[in-house]
């Protein structure tokens, strides 16, 4: 997947889409796409269009996710899948090393690097932006994560322009959607009556695959219709966040009483950080066996909501939920900008949907903004 | 980056062990032939086989390239296992990581080194460097504090520096038995006994609360925020900017620190639980 190149748009019918997925499989891509599993639409390995969530949509609200039948055959008629692609590239558990004692020293073995080619089917703009955000942490140094780099390296991306906004979506506020403008090989807009897909070409790789499929050139009215679909989605965002001067807003409100308020509600369960497509905290676990002859090193997802996260000998730095929520939200929306030149939030809304008590990051920001400068803490320079 | 990846430790041999106190040892780590280099203030991740890995500052002489010297206090499972490694035993090492003390900034100026407890370990390379190029620097003061005289690190060496008078050495302990002729009290109280010039630079390392009091006193003595440097500590799991644990506001202590100019930190330094 390389730079975007504007090409004429095409039309694929449903059979054309089926052929696209078959063509990608023939090119040795494993398909990762949306599918219904465990009462939710998730990203998982799929075989073809029969695995797509035909006729399903969902409602998402703070603390709520429900699958709902649409009453039509839409294949991408939902907003965001329950998970992002984080677990595909930045895997939840990874063995980093196997170590073995040898004489008085030790030797180190690594598992063979992952080499599979992945095609992301139905990728949403927010989730594509989230991959770019994670790239900045894990690829751009001073060190690069070799496992992430390997899993990330050979992608074919079939984006879908969002046809509806979820109740917790706010990508329009974050400038990350709903329209995908780059970062895809092909981008689909699902159109009805008749059921078909307008296809935008993003790369030469996309163009080459498309050339093997039965297709038509899109008419001007189809292009207008497709524009209308994504425009309508942009106009109907479930949430909004005012990001004006947000870094400075949060930096100057580190002792705001709202942190006490949210701490009363937050369970410290870590769901938001696990559902977040950009949260990258991990821990390193070293284990040994009973013989003392071999050992392993594992990386697994961690969360700044745990007490252990800030543990130093003698105690944790952030012992209160107040300080841990502040760390998470201030990092996501403010210090991330200093660290990586971008917000850590792509407006996917998952932290809101999957919070068991329905804490809403957009509402927390708004509450701080409403009482900008209020102070409840004792900190401050002497 | 090599194919082994940045999380892979390599085996190094314990060539020498110095018992510093009841719970502190200094390990000299080396391989057969490797020439090492590091800058004062940098740290390594040290791995005890099958137990775990912790960040440890280098406490040795940067001009000695045949070994890397680490001073470790036993405070948990990993540090205990490292402290118990026998002569000739092997530990894992990754590094060096982190930002150094800004030696160039001090050249031609006066330097005050303030160390609390184990905080003297990452400052000892500074003193070696200063002693090696003594004429490049102005007046050098070392203010070191510990819980008891027993806990003072590098006692014979510090005594030698004191005798040589190349460094102005002041010591203080929290509690002293009979026979202690030095000061009793917090290390910050030593600051009142030294001269501070308009050119003085301060390097500070110790527990965060000690550094807060030290910064307050340095500021009272009109040392500006841009000439105070601190070595900060946070939880570290990776040391290469991936794991997120060591964040301190916008900084990753592992790669943007551990040495910070106080000016960089001052908006966060006084906030609890940041």
Image (cartoon, coloured by chain):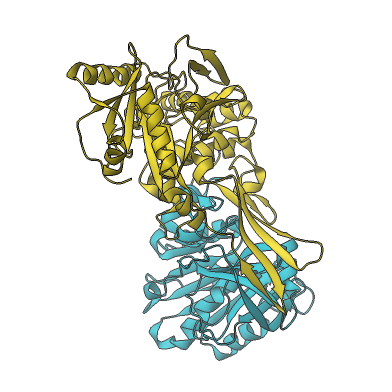
Residue toward you, B221 or A195: A195
Residue B175 visible in the displayed image: no
Q: Quadrant of residue B198?
A: bottom left
Name above or below for residue A26 compared with residue B236: above
Residue drawn at point x = 56 percent, y = 17 percent: A66
Q: Residue A244, image x and y in percent?
A: 33, 31
Please state which of residues B28 and A233 is positioned toward the viewer in this rendering.
A233
User: In this view of the protein, can residue B232 be seen by the observer?
Assistant: yes
Chain B colour as displayed:
cyan
Rendered view: B56 above or below A237: below
The letter of the yellow chain is A
- Depth check: B156 or A131 in front? A131
Report whether A292 appears left or right of A146: right
- Disc count in the image? 0
Q: Position of residue B71 (x, y in %)?
A: 64, 74
Q: Residue at x 67, y 73 (%)?
A: A106
Q: Position of residue A48 (x, y in %)?
A: 47, 30
Residue at image location 45% in from the left, 74% down from the top: B111
| Quadrant (top left, top right, bottom left, bottom right) of the N terminus of chain B | bottom left
**Camera-nearest residue between B126 and A222:** A222
């Amino acid at each position: 997947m390389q730079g975007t190149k504007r090409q004429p748009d095409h039309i694929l019918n449903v059979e054309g889409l089926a052929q696209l997925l078959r063509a990608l499989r023939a090119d040795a891509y494993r398909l990762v796409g949306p599918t219904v599993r465990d009462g939710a639409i998730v990203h998982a390995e799929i075989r073809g269009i029969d695995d797509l969530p035909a006729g399903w949509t969902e409602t998402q609200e703070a603390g709520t996710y429900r699958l709902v039948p649409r009453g039509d055959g839409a294949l991408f008629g939902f907003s965001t899948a329950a998970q992002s692609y984080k677990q595909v590239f930045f895997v939840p558990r990874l063995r980093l090393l196997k170590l073995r004692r040898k004489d008085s020293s030790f030797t180190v073995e690594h598992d063979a690097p992952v080499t599979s080619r992945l095609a992301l089917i139905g990728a949403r703009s927010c989730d594509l932006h989230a991959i770019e955000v994670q790239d900045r942490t894990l690829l751009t140094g001073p060190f690069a994560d070799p496992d992430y780099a390997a899993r990330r390296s050979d992608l074919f991306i079939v984006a879908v322009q969002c046809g509806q906004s979820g109740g917790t979506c706010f990508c329009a506020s974050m400038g990350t959607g709903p329209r995908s403008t780059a970062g895809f090989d092909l981008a689909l807009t699902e159109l009805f009556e008749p059921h078909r897909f307008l296809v935008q070409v993003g790369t030469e790789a996309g163009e080459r695959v498309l050339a093997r499929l039965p297709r038509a050139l899109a008419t001007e009215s189809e292009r207008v219709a497709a524009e209308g679909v994504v425009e309508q989605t942009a106009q109907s965002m479930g949430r909004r966040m005012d990001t004006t001067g947000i870094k400075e807003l949060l930096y100057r409100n580190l002792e705001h009483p709202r942190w006490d308020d949210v701490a009363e509600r937050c369970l410290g369960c870590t769901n938001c950080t696990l559902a977040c497509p950009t949260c990258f905290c991990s821990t390193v676990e070293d284990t040994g066996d009973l013989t003392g002859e071999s050992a392993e090193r594992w990386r697994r997802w961690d969360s700044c909501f745990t007490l252990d996260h800030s543990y130093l000998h003698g105690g944790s730095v952030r012992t209160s939920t107040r300080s841990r929520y502040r760390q998470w939200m201030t990092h996501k929306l403010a210090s991330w900008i200093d660290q990586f030149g971008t917000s850590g939030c792509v407006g996917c809304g998952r932290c809101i949907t999957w919070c068991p008590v329905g804490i809403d990051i957009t509402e927390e920001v708004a509450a701080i903004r409403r009482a900008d400068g209020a102070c409840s803490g004792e900190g401050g320079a002497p | 980056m090599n194919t082994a990846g940045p999380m892979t430790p390599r085996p190094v041999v314990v060539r020498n062990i110095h018992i510093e106190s009841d719970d502190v040892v200094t390990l000299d780590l080396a391989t057969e032939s490797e020439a090492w280099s590091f800058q004062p203030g940098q740290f390594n991740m040290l791995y005890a086989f099958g137990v775990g890995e912790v960040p440890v500052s280098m406490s040795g002489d940067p001009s000695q390239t045949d070994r890397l010297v680490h001073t470790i206090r036993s405070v948990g499972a990993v540090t205990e296992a490292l402290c118990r490694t026998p002569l000739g035993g092997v530990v894992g090492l990754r590094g060096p990581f982190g930002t150094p003390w800004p030696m160039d900034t001090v050249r031609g100026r006066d330097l005050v080194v303030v160390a609390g407890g184990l905080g003297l370990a990452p400052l000892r390379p500074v003193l070696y460097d200063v002693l090696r190029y003594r004429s490049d620097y102005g007046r050098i003061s070392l203010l070191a504090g510990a819980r008891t005289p027993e806990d003072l690190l590098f006692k014979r060496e510090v005594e030698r520096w004191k005798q040589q008078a190349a460094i102005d050495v002041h010591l203080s302990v929290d509690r002293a038995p009979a026979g202690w002729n030095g000061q009793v009290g917090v290390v910050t109280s030593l600051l009142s006994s030294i001269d501070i010039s308009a050119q003085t630079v301060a390097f500070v390392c110790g527990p965060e609360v000690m550094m807060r009091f030290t910064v307050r006193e340095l500021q009272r003595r009109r040392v500006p925020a841009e000439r105070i440097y601190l070595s900060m500590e946070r939880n570290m799991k990776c040391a290469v900017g991936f794991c997120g644990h060591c964040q301190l506001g916008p900084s990753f202590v592992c790669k943007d620190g551990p040495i910070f100019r106080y000016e960089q930190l001052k908006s966060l330094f006084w906030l609890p639980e940041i």
